[in-house]
Amino acid sequence: MARLDWQVEHVLRRAAFGPDAADLARFANTSAAAVTAYLVDFEQQPDDVDARIGDSAYVGITSRGQFSPNTRINDARQRWLFRMVHSRRPLQEKMALFWHNHFATTYTKVAGGVGGVQSTKMLALKAGELPGPQGQLELFRQFALGNFRDLLFNVARDPAMVVFLDGRTNVKRKPQENFGREIMELFTFGVGNYVEEDVYAAARVFTGWNLRRATDLPNTDPAGYYEFFYNPAQHDTTAKTFTFPVYGNGGLTIPERTAADGMQDAYDFITALALHPETARRLARKLWNFFVSELEAPDPAFVEAVATVYLENNMEMKPVVRYILGSSWFLDPSRLYARYSWPVEFVVRAIREVGWTGFSVNTARTPMANMGQTLFEPPDVAGWPQGQGWFSTGAMLARVNFATSLASNQRFNLAGAAAPHRASPSTFLNFFLQQLSPSPYATASYNELLAYLSAGGAWTGSDTQLNTKTAGLAKLILGSADYQFV
Amino acid sequence: MTRVSRRRFIRDGVAAFTVGFAAPAFLSDIARAQGVLSRNLVVVYLSGGNDALSTLVPYQDPFYFSRRPALAIPAGQVLQIGSDTGGTTLGFHPRLTGLHDIFNQGRLAIVQRTGYENSSRSHFQGTDIWGTANPASPSGSGWLGRYLDTLPLPVDALAGWSATQETPRALTASTVSVPSIPDAQAYSLSSPNSAAEALNERVAATRMASHVTTGQPHLSFVNGTLLGAFETLDRVALVNAYAPSVVYPTNGFGQALRTVAGSIAAGIGTRVYWVQLGGFDTHANQGNAGTGAYANLMGSFNDGLAAFYSDLQNQSLLNDTLVLQFSEFGRRINENGSGATAGTDHGAAGMMMAMGGGVRGGIFGTAASLNPDPANPALERNGTDVRHETDFRAIYAKVLDGWLGANSVAILGGDFRAGAPAII
């Protein structure tokens, strides 16, 4: 089947997880601008992907007993992978991934505090499926292209985050700095814009921000849950002075307030951080790396333009992302395949291109760990090391080995589709290069793939040869350097 | 919108050539030339900011107890190691029984109050500073990577070995891409086909990765990673057969050390290993002597290293190995919170340890008095954090010059030899 306009494919690789066969048909005569609008205005598409789980026409899941994505973390990982493979709102999932990396929270540490069932609920509970507040991932989906200040505020009171950055021990007499530091260093404007005294003051802003058990049930009970709880008795009510303006009039000090009104401190502080021009620029740089290019440093003109869009639109992310995807920076041919794919992107794109009938996303979990990315388990609060950081030798072997297992699993489906193209090694290879989408090969590499098809015996196109070379060729293409970019 | 051509399969206008292709083979000649069975360095990095005051306890300092009512380890529980030259009596955390034995054998050196001026309290900046050995501009290659860059070319692909999932900045080099191999068993190449066909695939993949394209450094980088993987696979597989002389803990740290011991015993020729133990960011629930997060960390740290030490000693490999431990910063003197949930926030100076057959054991440097008087010169920031006494780069210099036989001035971009304690 024919590939799409290169700009359309570019948009679909970056702002989605690459086109599958249905997309190739759906977008055959669609402009990049229309595809971008389709992705950005995702509310217009149904959010019905979870209902397809278990349907044999879709990628499979594997569970010990009942599939429990709200209470068992490996099932939550599978549900998210399933959504990424099949969602009709792929940009929503992609932005959820972006925020998951930005507000990186690890299952293991949260589970250390509240146990595995509650940790999974805090990270992945889909509202209404069990008692308790929605999980952090659902917050990221809700605010995928929402208002950054609102997202930040909700993250600050998100149960998983409160456990992860130790908010529960942030008390008036002895404030605890973990969240107060990271909200400045990692979640907003970054190192260089604050001093240690600001960290102390920020910690005091969040004193009393805690959780409470909402039920008497043990942590192991799926119906038990925690909820955010502001404890006025533990809030430090004294004034907090910063080295940067907190208020529009340039005021540096959050005034002394009654304990009952103490949550207002955080509203003021978070608003100041979210509106800070360096926060706008830092988000712009992160979005450059995510959407535009990792091969070039962010263009200062891009950073200023995106920061302006962000501030002029009251910190709403939808106009920001729409602007980026329509910009000449994004659509320039030099930005094609200019980003190192994350392991999860590699896996999802490979499944969408190779095929999924009879394949379980559970098969991807261990390989993804070896590639360096376990969902809900970023290495630390700074998120995953990206770009070249994904490509250690061991991680690259894991990519090749995942390609092997996917190619083995899909060998017969793929060989059947390839059979009409068996006339010669080049027709056969060209079929695969229609089906898969590595960046264009250098002639020498293309010729190596051709040579491989005749290695071990001249090309006959027999069924045996077809089955063998189908799996081998899919592995070689997915495992080649040229396939590791989106 | 302009309709542009459909995606091409082959790019043109890009010069491409192929480097001399070698079938997958052992690089044993190179490895041998660079000194198989010679000295190696094993870095043990405690990530998250180790609370040095709980590792090495000044158990007779009254301020230690008054400033840490929940976390202080009772004097009766520490493992005493005597006193430093400043007269402060010190003891190990009670879980460090194995290290206590090694200390008593004279093969463990402790350097107190290591750090640098204006210590970063950020994990990420701090890690980069320790990784690059450059507090002023912590970017670019790492100090151990720069050491690897001094080895004769071509540098063996296994000259460095990260036994953690990622390759740390410290091992970022320009002449070699250091592999990350936490588990030799998983470091393998699978095929959907028979053995003969698997070889065809490997030959094709190797040849594809050998094509060098100009003007595409990102592709060259990933191809270099692939080639590094293919070059190292067979030698790493030798480690799979390793039968250690002791039982290692089953946790990740213990298994990573087992892998390192296997590599040393197999004579792979690696010069620098990197092993990491995480979880030291103990803002909460730090605990004290027997229970809590910190005691568990010390248990993992001790049990893994003690097994590693015994394993090497049993095989007479101890004299070739130097273990060097550090973390990105120490922690605040005052505890936060209270009771069982108390913890410590980010601080300044920490401590370093060196262990091995060539180590001159003992306590180096002096402990800080923890008197919160803002005039206390051993503390900084109004008496809240421990101030460094020994620049961490002095220890790096000692290791580079005295153990690895390199030139620390060139590698560290300055002369930090002065003030280096005689740990080896």
Image (spheres, helix red, strand yellow):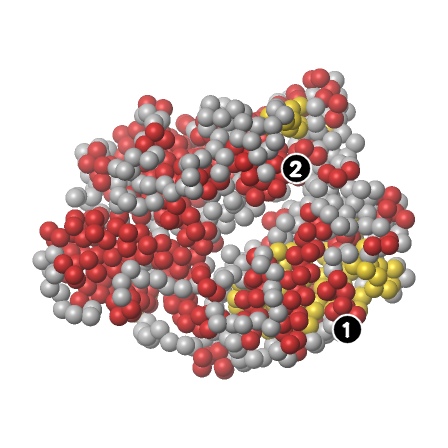
Q: Quadrant of residue B71?
A: top right
Q: Can residue A170 be spotted in the picture?
A: yes
Is A282 left, or right, of B189 in this rendering? right
Callout 1 crowding tier (Cα within 10 Å): few <14, some 14–19, many ≥20: few
CA distance for labels 1 and 2: 40 Å
- Compared to A186, does A211 lie above or below? above
Residue B93 image point, x, y percent? 77, 56
- Compared to B348, does A31 lie above or below? above
Name the residue that disc number 1 marks. B105
Point 76% across, 29% down: residue: A172
Element marked by disc 2: loop
Residue B89 image point, x, y percent? 87, 60
Dot 1 falls on which chain?
B
Q: Which of A39 and B408 is in front in this view?
A: A39
Q: Which of A434 and A227 is in front in this view?
A: A227
Residue A239 image point, x, y percent? 75, 25
Dot 2 falls on which chain?
A
Q: What residue type is labelled 2?
A: Asp
Point 45% across, 35% down: residue: A69
Is B325 left, or right, of A121 in this rendering? right
Q: Can residue A39 be spotted in the picture?
A: no
Name the residue that disc number 2 marks. A166
Element marked by disc 1: loop
Q: Which amino acid does label 1 sit on?
A: Gln
Q: Quadrant of residue A429?
A: bottom left
Residue A364 image point, x, y percent? 39, 48
Q: Which of B379 and A261 is in front in this view?
A: A261
